[in-house]
Structure formats: structure tokens, C-alpha cells
Image (cartoon, rainbow, N blue to C red):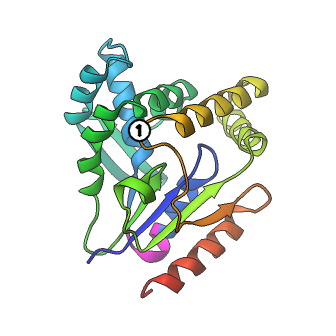
Amino acid sequence: MSCIITVDGPSGAGKGTLCRLLAKATGYALLDSGALYRLTALAALQRGLDITDEESVAEVASNLDVAFMTSQTGVEVMLEGKNVSLDIRQESAGMAASKVAALPLVRAALLARQRAFASTEGLVADGRDMGTVVFPHAAVKLFLTASAQVRAERRLLQLQASGEMPDFDKILAAIITRDKQDSERASSPLVAAPDAILLDSTVLSIEQVFDVALHAVKKYTSL
């Protein structure tokens, strides 16, 4: 049976980096479920759809032409043959994804696609409802969080490093708004599974978070 590790938590907590490190350390496959929602939102917007039109967006989700391709710099996300790795990481894409993720029909459309990523050698799943809905029987469930202030500061540095001059207050406001959307949505809200191991990266480096996470993985699996 496939060994599954789930990592849930709010945007900017460091889930993506932690999952990549865990996947590398374990040799497991990697699922970035957030990318699927961002891709759905991006594809819907490219088609000129209203992203609150549940049936239309669910149809897009059901027929996404998506591929994840590994490279020396990380994972490249392809939509209909085009590299959209940078496009889906824009703040606007994140906010649109949060709205799309609140639509039950969209979540249902993507649920089977996410579960199909489970492989015989194992899977590290990054998202917001991986341990509660998608893989409720996962061997190890982690919930990674950090204060909104710290997450906004991290995002500011990322954007500045890419040559942008963002407004910190707008970044912080967007994070707070998205947290509210994710935690209060009726369908699969952002919440830690009862048996999840809670990790707070507010005052921890990614190396320290990884050490704690890998210790937990080794404790509860055969690694």
C-alpha cells in the first residue's frame, strides 16, 4: 500500500518548500494540490469565465490539460502545453484559486484527480484539505502554519527578489482575506485534521521545520 504524507496549512507557511524537501528525502512522488486550483482559476479566466460560475468552472477543472515537469530549478507547471509556473504564483491567481476552491462542484471534480497521484512508492501531498478530505487515512499528517505577519514578510522578500516593488500592507491584507476565505468556506474548509502534527514556522527556519517533520515521518512509517 502507498505511504502518504500530507502537509496542510495556509498560504505562505512554507508548505511547498517542506514538501519538496520531504519528497527528496523519501523518494516519494509530490502533489501540489494548490497548483491544480490555481490552474483551474487561470484556465477559467483565460476563457473569459466568471470564476463564481460553479458549473462552468467545474467543467474546466474536469478537462484540465495539465502536466508537472521536473527540472533543475524545481517543478514546471504546464497548462495546455504552455509553462505557466510564474503565472499561477501571482497574487491574483492565488486569490482567484481561493474563490474557485470554495465551489463544491470544482472540489469534487478535482478530488479524483488528486487521489490518482497516490503511487505505490509513496506520495507527499501539499494542500489545505489533504489530511482531512483527500487522504484521510494518510500515514503522517502535518499541519504547517505561521503568523500572517511573518507570511506577508516572506512573500514581500520573494517578490522583491524577482524585481517587483510590492506594497506590504496589500500583501498582508490579501493573506488575511485568503485565510478567511479558506477557513470559512462551506466545502472542505482549511482546518487541521484531529490527528495532525502541528508545526508553527513563525520562529523556525525551514531547516528546523524539515528536521521535525522528517523525524515524525520516520517515527510513523518504515523509513
**Which residue is at the front of the view, 98 or 157?**
98
Query: Residue 13, image x and y in percent?
Result: 64, 50
Residue 125, position as x, y percentages in the image: 42, 59
Quarter occupied by residue 91: top right
Horizontal side, residue 112 vs residue 208: left or right: left
Task: Pick out the residue farthest to the bottom.
Answer: 222
Residue 25 belongs to the span the image colors magenta:
yes
Residue 96 is left or right of residue 161, and the answer is left
Is residue 205 highlighted in magenta?
no
Q: Secondary structure at mark 1?
A: loop
Looking at numbered disc 1 in the image, what kind of residue is underneath it? Ser
**From which residue to which does the magenta span run?**
23-29
Is residue 88 depicted above or below 128 in this figure? Answer: above
For the N terminus, the quadrant is bottom left
155 to the left or right of 93: right
Label 1, on which residue?
A: 187
Q: Residue at x 28, y 32 (%)?
A: 105
Above/below status of 42 relative to 24: above
For the point 43% across and 32% down, the residue is 102
Residue 48 picture location, percent across and down:
33, 11
Query: Residue at the location (78% across, 40% down)?
Result: 149
Q: Residue at x 45, y 35 (%)?
A: 186
Along the line of sight, the residue nearer the viewer: 163 or 212: 212
Position of residue 70 measured from the top left corner of the image (x, y, whole percent): 37, 55
Residue 59 visible in image: yes
Viewer-side residue, 81 vs 26: 26
Q: Does the rendering let one see residue 64?
A: no
Which image quarter: residue 15?
bottom right
> Quarter holding the C terminus?
bottom left
